[in-house]
């Protein structure tokens, strides 16, 4: 069996969407003749902890965990132990204290490309030791954090090993970088590092066409989207509520993913006598969004829940009446594809999306007949869609997406990955 060394920062017990992609690839790679070894962190800065994901790591897979310095510990020491560590955004808020603002400014301009690079020397040492001790056909690095790709670049230069760089998000073209002020030299160094990775790797894989275009990778790149694992849904029983029409959103909600238009549509329907609609947010909700919905939600339609383990999340997802998807309301967002959309498809529950109607996410909803994407402010049409699905729920009509969703199964995507590996 051929061997591949996979270097990932986010790995169980870390939780969140960023863990799922390589956890599933690792699960299915041996079925296609490739045995993975994983190099990851022992105690990383994770957005969430999900111990249940540890059970999904196959027993035969070797996982090498290294120590790492923690930016999160540093941040809390100086900014305040109750301050949230910046994750997925580096914007400074007026309410932030002086030290927090100073630390974020330092991180933005003097730690390139990201704070997780504190792990690199430990990961490089562990990966190098493994390459000297065993024969590997390839190394794969996955980002974000995109600093992980710099480990791959060093390994490529030293060991001349075949190297694939996997991009789950854009690097220098990710949307939040357009909203923060960075020094010219910082942006220059960031772009230079990105170009060195694109030039230095043997192949690139991304989750969307838009990310591929942004990297200017040419024919070096392949798209393997995120997906779902049918096994995760196998034993979940459907127990749809008969009292409430539950509309559920899973994941973090930031001001760029403001769901206020959906809430306004629900209140429009309440005025017409439909009062048993309930909205559930499962994950972190930013202070800005909480403030907006508190002003709008006079009848407590919304219930905010904390992060729950992935297996529990899927149970809630399957038993929802309508799933909510919000694409970041930022410029050039047509290529944004959240990982949850694929598990939404597998849940076989209709999807209401807010975002660009000509975007890649809208195309997937249309292709699979799983739901519909609406403009952010089109409250009236959003209300009409909710009413249609509400009436179907009242009448007990079943819903199913088309068979087109099968191509997004994790096993089929792993087969695509191995075909790329075989061609190196």
Image (tube, rainbow, N blue to C red):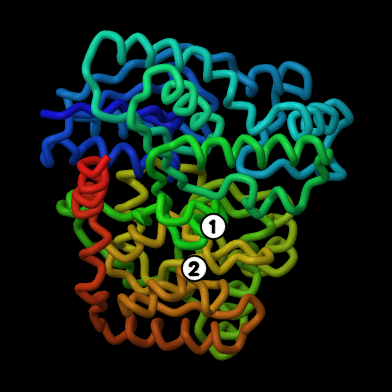
Check disc 1 and report the residue beneath it. 303
The image quadrant where one finds the N terminus is top left
Crowdedness near tag 2: few (<14), some (14–19) or many (≥20) residues, C-alpha within 10 Å? some
Q: Position of residue 301 (x, y in %)?
A: 57, 67
The kind of secondary structure element at disc 2 is strand
Residue at position x 38%, y 72% from top? 364
SS class of the residue under badge 1?
Answer: strand
Left or right, residue 58 beside residue 144: left
Marks 1/2 in contact by CB < 8 Å: the verdict is: yes
184 is higher (above) or lower (below) than 323: above
Question: Quadrant of the rendered structure where residue 17 is?
Answer: top left
Q: Which residue is mark 2?
A: 278
Locate residue 28 relative to residue 242 in the image: left or right: left
User: 225 above or below 370?
Assistant: above
Point out residue 209 in the picture as x, y percentages from the top left corner. Answer: 46, 62
Is residue 123 shown above or below 175? above
Q: Position of residue 144 (x, y in %)?
A: 52, 39
In this rendering, does residue 232 appear at all? no
């Amino acid at each position: 069996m051929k061997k591949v060394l996979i270097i990932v920062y986010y790995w169980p017990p870390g939780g969140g969407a960023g863990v799922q992609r390589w956890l599933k690839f690792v699960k299915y790679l041996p079925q296609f003749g490739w045995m993975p070894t994983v190099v990851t962190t022992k105690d990383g800065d994770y957005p969430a902890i999900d111990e249940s994901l540890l059970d999904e790591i196959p027993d035969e897979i070797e996982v090498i965990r290294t120590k790492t310095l923690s930016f999160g510990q540093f941040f809390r020491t100086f900014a305040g132990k109750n301050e949230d560590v910046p994750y997925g955004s580096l914007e400074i808020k007026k309410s932030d204290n002086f030290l927090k603002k100073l630390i974020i400014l330092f991180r933005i301009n003097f730690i390139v490309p990201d704070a997780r690079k504190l792990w690199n020397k430990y990961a490089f040492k562990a990966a190098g030791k493994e390459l000297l001790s065993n024969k590997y056909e390839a190394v794969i690095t996955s980002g974000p954090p995109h600093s992980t790709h710099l480990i791959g670049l060093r390994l490529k230069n030293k060991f001349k090993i075949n190297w694939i760089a996997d991009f789950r998000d854009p690097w220098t073209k990710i949307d939040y970088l357009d909203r923060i002020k960075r020094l010219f030299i910082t942006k220059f160094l960031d772009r230079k590092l990105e170009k060195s990775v694109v030039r230095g790797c043997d192949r690139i894989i991304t989750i969307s066409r838009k990310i591929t275009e942004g990297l200017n990778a040419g024919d070096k790149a392949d798209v393997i989207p995120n997906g779902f694992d049918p096994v995760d849904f196998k034993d979940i029983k459907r127990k749809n509520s008969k009292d409430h029409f539950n509309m559920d959103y899973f994941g973090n909600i930031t001001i760029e993913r403001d769901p206020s238009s959906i809430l306004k549509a629900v209140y429009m329907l309440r005025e017409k006598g439909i009062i048993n609609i309930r909205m559930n947010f499962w994950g972190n909700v930013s202070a800005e969004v909480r403030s907006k919905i508190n002003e709008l939600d006079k009848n407590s339609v919304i219930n905010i829940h904390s992060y729950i383990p992935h297996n529990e999340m899927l149970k809630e997802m399957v038993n929802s009446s309508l799933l909510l998807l919000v694409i970041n309301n930022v410029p050039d967002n047509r290529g944004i594809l959240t990982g949850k959309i694929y598990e939404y498809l597998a849940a076989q529950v209709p999807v209401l999306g807010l975002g660009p109607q000509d975007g890649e996410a809208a195309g997937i909803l249309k292709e699979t007949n799983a739901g519909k994407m609406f403009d952010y402010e089109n409250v009236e049409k959003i209300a009409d869609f909710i009413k249609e699905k509400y009436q179907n729920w009242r009448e007990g009509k079943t819903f199913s997406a088309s068979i087109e969703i099968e191509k997004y199964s994790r096993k089929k995507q792993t087969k695509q990955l191995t075909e790329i590996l075989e061609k190196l």
